[in-house]
């Protein structure tokens, strides 16, 4: 008898939405006593329960200035360069995101290995880790558009073939994220529930979804159910603060009409034991700059050097 592997997280296959159970741990057991413990018990418990954790002021003012300059230089160098990694804002054409920054820029390549973030990812995911995806979301002043509600894992599972919920996003704030300029919003506890979405994924969906996601967005009734249950939390913080959130935490952010950019760099750490398989259904794999498949190797901690 041929055992077809049953998809534990089906989505975009039916004309109906559903909330399914999560089958994976949130905080994984440590692989060895030798593994560096970066979180205290309260932080681990909070991440397990809420699906996100804020760490204010993890990077100091000099480091933030150094990273901010690197971010601005990337935008100058890459704008109008016709690079596929650069996603423009619908309408204004301003830079919305630059993907793959950890492979395109040495400073961000070093930043992903800084123990203050890498060791948190290794601890939560209970293994060696690598970068599945990185991006700078610039969310410029006046014209920064929203990121509608979604679970990243719903996309990474269906479009990238990510097997299990054993990944997390690390958002490092490079400008102040205030209540006004479109901070990340999360629904605490939503990561415990998998929202299976309606609709079918068009070919090369990423060409649209990275500008404005329309497929793989949760049904409004289910979104209201999760929000009524867990509330909505705005992750505001000063530049240099860090937000870790589970791959399945429902999140989004409003547009930015203030004069003040809300620019964050995002690193997606994936367990080395959770590498991508073939995408669901008959989809072609997304490009390497959105979903890493080549040259996968465990990251080793190395402090960021700004001298
Ligand atoms: O498709 C993706 O992988 C990207 N889309 C969103 C809205 N968040 C995760 C990721 O950057
Ligand atoms: Fe996202």
Image (spheres, rainbow, N blue to C red):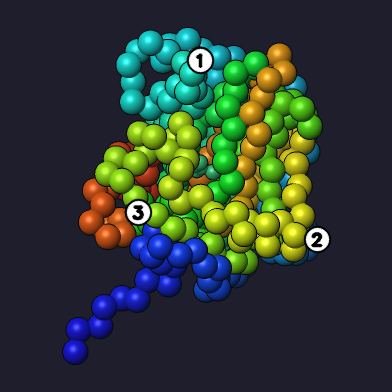
Label 1 C-beta lies within 8 Å of the nearest ligand 1 atom:
no
Disc with the residue nearer the chain's start (2 vs 1): 2
In this picture, is 206 found above or below 8?
A: above
Distance Cα–Cα, label 2 vs label 1: 43 Å
Q: Which mark is residue 42?
A: 2
Please state which of residues 202 and 154 is positioned toward the viewer in this rendering: 202
Give me the residue at 35% from left, 13% from top: 81
Disc with the residue nearer the chain's start (1 vs 3): 1
Can residue 24 be seen from the camera position used here?
A: no
Q: Local crowd at mark 2 within 10 Å, few (<14), some, or many (≥20)? A: few
Considering every residue shown, the one lying at the far bottom of the view is 1
Distance Cα–Cα, label 2 vs label 3: 41 Å
**Residue 135 x, y percent position in the rendering:** 49, 33
Residue beneath label 3, please? 200
Q: Secondary structure at mark 3?
A: loop
Give me the residue at 55% from left, 49% from top: 150
- Do callouts 2 and 1 mark residues in contact (Cβ within 8 Å)? no
Q: Local crowd at mark 3 within 10 Å, few (<14), some, or many (≥20)? A: some
Residue beneath label 1, please? 92
* Pair 2/1: label in front: 1
Give me the residue at 68% from left, 62% from top: 225
**Residue 53 x, y percent position in the rendering:** 72, 50
Q: Local crowd at mark 1 within 10 Å, few (<14), some, or many (≥20)? A: few
* Pair 2/3: label in front: 3
Disc with the residue nearer the chain's start (2 vs 3): 2
Q: Which mark is residue 27?
A: none
């Amino acid at each position: 008898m041929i055992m077809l592997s049953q998809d534990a997280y089906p989505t975009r296959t039916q004309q109906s939405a559903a909330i399914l159970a999560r089958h994976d741990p949130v905080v994984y057991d440590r692989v060895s006593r030798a593994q560096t413990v970066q979180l205290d018990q309260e932080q681990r418990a909070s991440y397990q329960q809420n699906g996100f954790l804020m760490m204010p002021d993890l990077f100091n003012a000099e480091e933030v200035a150094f990273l901010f300059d690197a971010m601005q230089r990337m935008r100058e160098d890459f704008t109008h360069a016709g690079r596929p990694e650069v996603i423009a804002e619908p309408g204004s054409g301003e830079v919305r995101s630059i993907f793959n920054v950890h492979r395109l820029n040495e400073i961000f390549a070093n930043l992903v290995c800084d123990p203050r973030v890498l060791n948190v990812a290794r601890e939560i995911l209970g293994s060696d880790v690598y970068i599945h995806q990185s991006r700078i979301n610039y969310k410029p002043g006046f014209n920064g558009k929203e990121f509608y509600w979604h679970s990243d894992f719903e996309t990474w599972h269906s479009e990238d073939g990510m097997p299990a919920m054993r990944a997390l996003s690390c958002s490092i704030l490079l400008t102040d994220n205030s209540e006004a300029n479109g901070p990340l919003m999360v629904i605490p506890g939503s990561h415990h529930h998998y929202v299976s979405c309606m609709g079918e994924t068009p070919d090369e969906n990423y060409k649209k979804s990275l500008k404005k996601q329309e497929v793989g967005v949760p049904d409004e009734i289910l979104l209201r159910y999760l929000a009524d249950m867990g509330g909505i939390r705005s992750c505001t913080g000063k530049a240099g603060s860090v937000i870790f959130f589970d791959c399945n935490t429902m999140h989004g952010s409003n547009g930015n009409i203030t004069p003040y950019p809300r620019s964050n760099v995002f690193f997606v750490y994936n367990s080395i034991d959770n590498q991508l398989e073939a995408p669901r259904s008959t989809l072609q794999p997304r490009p390497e700059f959105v979903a890493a498949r080549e040259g996968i190797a465990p990251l080793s901690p190395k402090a960021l050097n700004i001298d």
